[in-house]
Amino acid sequence: MFDRWLLPLVVRLQIRKDERERGDIPGWVMITLMTVAIATAIWTLVSDELMDTLKGVLENVTGDNGNAS
């Protein structure tokens, strides 16, 4: 008696649950591509300053100030 309406209801609820949990793959791809684009743009704008800063930090850590002994 309950099989007539219960089974289709359970099937419909399962389908809706699967659709909700599927995720939004194109959205994640777009976010990843935009993040890479922003990081690349920032890197091209400030790469010289970043390299100079990194060299300065490494020189301070190693104690090498460009003087060859």
Image (spheres, helix red, strand yellow):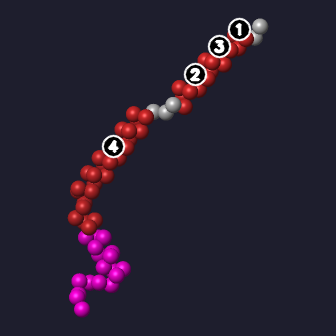
Separation of marks 3 and 2 at Cα, in angstroms = 11 Å
Number of the front mark, 4 or 1: 1
Closer to the chain start, of discs 2 and 4, is 2
The residue lying toward the viewer, choosing from 36 and 15, is 15
Q: Which residue carries the number 4 mark?
A: 34
| Residue 60 point in image, percent of width and height | 33, 80
Separation of marks 2 and 4 at Cα, in angstroms = 32 Å
Separation of marks 4 and 1 at Cα, in angstroms = 50 Å
Q: Secondary structure at mark 3?
A: helix
Which image quarter holds the N terminus? top right
Q: Is residue 18 above or below residue 5?
A: below
| Residue 52 point in image, percent of width and height | 25, 70
Disc 4 residue type (three-letter): Met
**What's drawn in magenta, residue-wise?**
52-69
Residue 7 among those drawn in magenta: no
Q: Secondary structure at mark 2?
A: helix
Q: Quadrant of residue 44?
A: bottom left
Q: Is residue 33 above or below residue 53?
A: above
Disc 1 residue type (three-letter): Arg
Q: Which residue carries the number 1 mark?
A: 4
Q: Which residue carries the number 3 mark?
A: 8
| Residue 2 point in image, percent of width and height | 75, 11
| Mark sitting on residue 15 | 2
| Residue 36 point in image, percent of width and height | 32, 48
